[in-house]
């Protein structure tokens, strides 16, 4: 009998006993109490935010206010609850009935870096892309070569997800997806850009990626992004560099990423659309003046992409971005998104 046919029994208390100290160390609350520095920059991670919530802080509470009120006594009172809550969240990521993958999720978290290929996904990506990878891995386990079946061999969540998606392409059954509602909003010698108008279209255009907006087996976050602006799938005609292969340390220094630079021909960008006053259209109708920015940008493996890298390191992307045709396409898709989502005409400047 091969090892993957055995039923693995997961026990919360066993995992807690094994990883409790490592979980608390990784959350770094003690570091902040001791030194006033949380680590990994000033941004609070989703996993740290969960622990803070256990201690009674509000999710929307100001960070300075949080750190001024976090005391040794408060932290000591809630250590057990913090670890218990952390494990409950990890159990929600594990798709198996017996939570057999939780110890590996916890191991990847406590061994993770702050950024780069060894970073652990935030809650959004954990419940979508990572969970989807676990579902695929579980379903593939009898089809893939035996050397890939032991989940303990994967050193990080990113390593596991990249391997699983590659195995799915080679050994998995291809899904027949509904193409949904999509539109080509720009096509040139530089790129073809698609606008998915619904979740089905987002999944269809995002096949083969690790985007949380393309998940079909786990949580899909298309609607959460779409409420603030359109998602765009940019298929570049020539490859672009999205990461230069250098990582920034906590102390501001740099070191070379062992995984090297990343070069791709497809990215996803989320446009954030807002209004700035109103313009009169005549006949008693008014319309919101809209402006847009590119917010989150990701490569196919859902690695975040910095806009300055795209613009400064890729002459083809820069030429596309600077062209009047591209800028008009961005303006137009904002108008279309506004209309498509029923946010358009008003009868007066005050919406009366």
Image (spheres, rainbow, N blue to C red):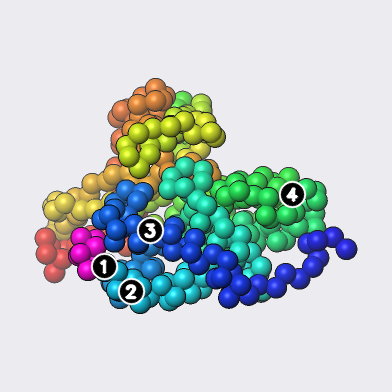
Q: Which mark is residue 70?
A: 1
Distance between the Cα atoms at labels 3 and 4? 33 Å
* Residue occupying the far top of the picture: 315
Q: Mark 2 or 4 closer to N-term?
A: 2
Marks 2 and 3, how far apart in space? Answer: 14 Å
Q: Can see residue 104?
A: yes
> Magenta stretch: dominant SS?
helix
Label 2, secondary structure: give it: loop
Nearest the camera: 304 or 156? Answer: 156
Q: Is residue 52 magenta?
A: no
Q: CA distance from mark 3 to mark 1?
A: 12 Å
Label 1: which secondary element: loop
Disc nearer the start of the sequence (3/1): 3
Q: Which mark is residue 148?
A: 4
Q: Which residue is mark 2?
A: 55
Residue 265 point in image, percent of width and height = 52, 33
Q: Position of residue 327 (x, y in %)?
A: 30, 35
Label 2 or label 3, whichever lies nearer to me, is 3
Q: Residue at x 51, y 37 (%)?
A: 266
The magenta stretch spans residue 63? yes
User: Which circle's residue, 3 or 4, is located before the other in the chain?
Assistant: 3
Q: Are there few (<14), some (14-19), or many (20+) residues within 10 Å of tag 2?
A: some
- Name the residue carrying label 3: 28
In the foreground, 146 or 71: 71
N-terminal label among 2 and 3: 3
Provide the residue span drawn in magenta.
Answer: 62-70
In the rendered image, the quadrant that contains the N terminus is bottom right
């Amino acid at each position: 009998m091969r090892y993957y046919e055995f039923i693995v029994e997961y026990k919360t208390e066993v995992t807690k006993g094994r990883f409790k100290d490592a979980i608390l160390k990784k959350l770094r609350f003690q570091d902040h109490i001791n030194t006033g520095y949380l680590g990994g920059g000033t941004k609070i991670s989703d996993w740290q935010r969960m622990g803070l919530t256990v201690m009674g802080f509000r999710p929307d509470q100001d960070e300075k206010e949080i750190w001024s009120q976090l005391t040794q006594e408060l932290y000591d009172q809630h250590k057990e609850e913090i670890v218990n809550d952390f494990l409950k969240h990890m159990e929600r990521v594990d798709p198996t009935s017996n939570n057999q993958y939780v110890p590996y999720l916890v191991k990847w978290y406590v061994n993770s870096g702050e950024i780069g290929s060894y970073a652990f996904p935030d809650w959004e990506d954990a419940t979508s892309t990572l969970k989807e990878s676990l579902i695929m891995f579980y379903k593939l386990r009898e089809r893939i070569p035996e050397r890939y079946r032991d989940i303990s061999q994967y050193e990080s969540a990113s390593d596991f997800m990249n391997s699983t998606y590659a195995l799915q392409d080679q050994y998995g059954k291809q899904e027949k997806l509904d193409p949904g509602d999509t539109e080509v909003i720009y096509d040139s010698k530089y790129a073809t850009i698609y606008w998915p108008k619904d979740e089905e279209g987002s999944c269809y255009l995002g096949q083969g990626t690790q985007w949380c907006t393309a998940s079909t087996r786990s949580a899909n976050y298309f609607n959460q992004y779409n409420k603030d602006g359109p998602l765009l799938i940019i298929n570049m005609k020539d490859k672009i560099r999205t990461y230069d292969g250098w990582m920034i340390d906590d102390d501001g220094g740099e070191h070379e990423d062992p995984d090297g630079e990343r070069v791709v021909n497809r990215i996803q960008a989320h446009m954030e659309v807002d209004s700035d006053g109103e313009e009169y259209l005549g006949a008693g109708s008014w319309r919101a003046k809209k402006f847009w920015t590119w917010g989150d940008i990701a490569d196919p493996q859902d690695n975040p992409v910095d806009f300055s890298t795209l613009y400064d390191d890729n002459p083809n992307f820069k030429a596309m971005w600077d062209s009047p045709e591209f800028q008009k396409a961005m303006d137009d898709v904002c108008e279309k998104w506004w209309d498509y989502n029923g946010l358009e005409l008003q009868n007066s400047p005050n919406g009366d």
